[in-house]
Image (cartoon, helix red, strand yellow):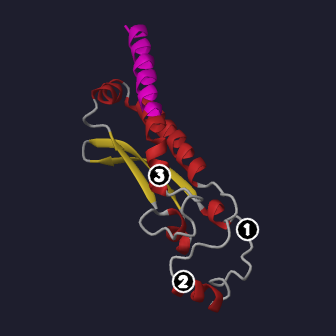
């Protein structure tokens, strides 16, 4: 599971927006949180090309286990069915803890073997260079996600300023 928690307590721009129009800020924050999670989800849930042969096993033991267990239960030859990319899910919600408000976004899978395919800390050599890891996607998408939140803060402040100008 990947969880990204944005805490804007120390970011003056977001603090101004929230203080000026908390309902508008909450709806904007939730929307931009959804956009950010969509970006991450789209890049994590990608099905790579077929492996090159011969397979680069982590060890002879792994190779023997694969064949002894009929492809770890998936059959030999392995039939690609898109299960891992389809297993990735997403969730976004507003969170409050004391005086801190933010948005929590998750991109996650409950597939037990996913970490051996898409987690840099566990990824098997069989999958290196073909399957993106969660960590590489986070690094790749961080600038785009940050920009989404920056733009949302500016839009919210602009809308708040216009609303305040109309009020007597």
Give the camera-side residue of 11 and 136. 136
Depth check, mark 3 against mark 2: the one in front is 2
Near-viewer residue (98 or 80): 80
Secondary structure beneath dot 3 equals helix
> How many other residues sit within 10 Å of disc 2, few (<14), some (14-19) or many (≥20)?
few
Q: Which residue is mark 1?
A: 81
Q: Residue at the location (42% across, 35% down)?
A: 146
The label nearer to you, 3 versus 1, is 3
Query: Residue 129 at what x, y percent from top left?
Result: 56, 58
First of labels 3, 2 by sequence position: 2
Q: Quadrant of the C terminus?
A: top left
**Residue 126 lies in what quarter of the image?**
bottom right
- Magenta-highlighted residues: 147-168
Residue 156 percent location from the top left of the image: 43, 24
Nearest the eye: 52 or 82: 52
Q: Main secondary structure of the magenta part?
A: helix
- Horizontally, is 118 left or right of 69 in the view? left
User: Picture quarter containing residue 55?
Assistant: bottom right
In the displayed structure, would residue 39 be above or below residue 77?
above
Residue designated by label 2 = 62
Of the two numbered discs 1 and 2 in the rendering, the one whose residue sits closer to the viewer: 2
């Amino acid at each position: 599971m990947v969880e990204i928690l944005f805490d804007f307590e120390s970011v003056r721009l977001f603090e101004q927006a929230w203080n000026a129009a908390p309902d508008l800020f909450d709806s904007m924050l939730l929307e931009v949180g959804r956009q950010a999670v969509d970006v991450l989800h789209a890049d994590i849930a990608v099905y790579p090309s077929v492996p090159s042969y011969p397979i680069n096993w982590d060890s002879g033991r792994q190779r023997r286990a694969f064949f002894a267990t009929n492809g770890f239960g998936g059959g030999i030859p392995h039939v690609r069915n898109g299960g891992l990319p389809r297993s990735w899910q997403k969730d976004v919600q507003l969170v409050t803890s004391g005086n801190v408000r933010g948005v929590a976004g998750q991109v996650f899978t409950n597939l037990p073997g996913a970490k051996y395919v898409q987690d840099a800390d566990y990824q098997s050599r069989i999958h290196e260079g073909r399957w993106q890891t969660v960590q590489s996607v986070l690094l790749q998408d961080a600038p785009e996600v940050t920009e989404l939140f920056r733009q949302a803060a500016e839009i919210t402040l602009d809308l708040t300023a216009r609303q305040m100008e109309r009020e007597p």
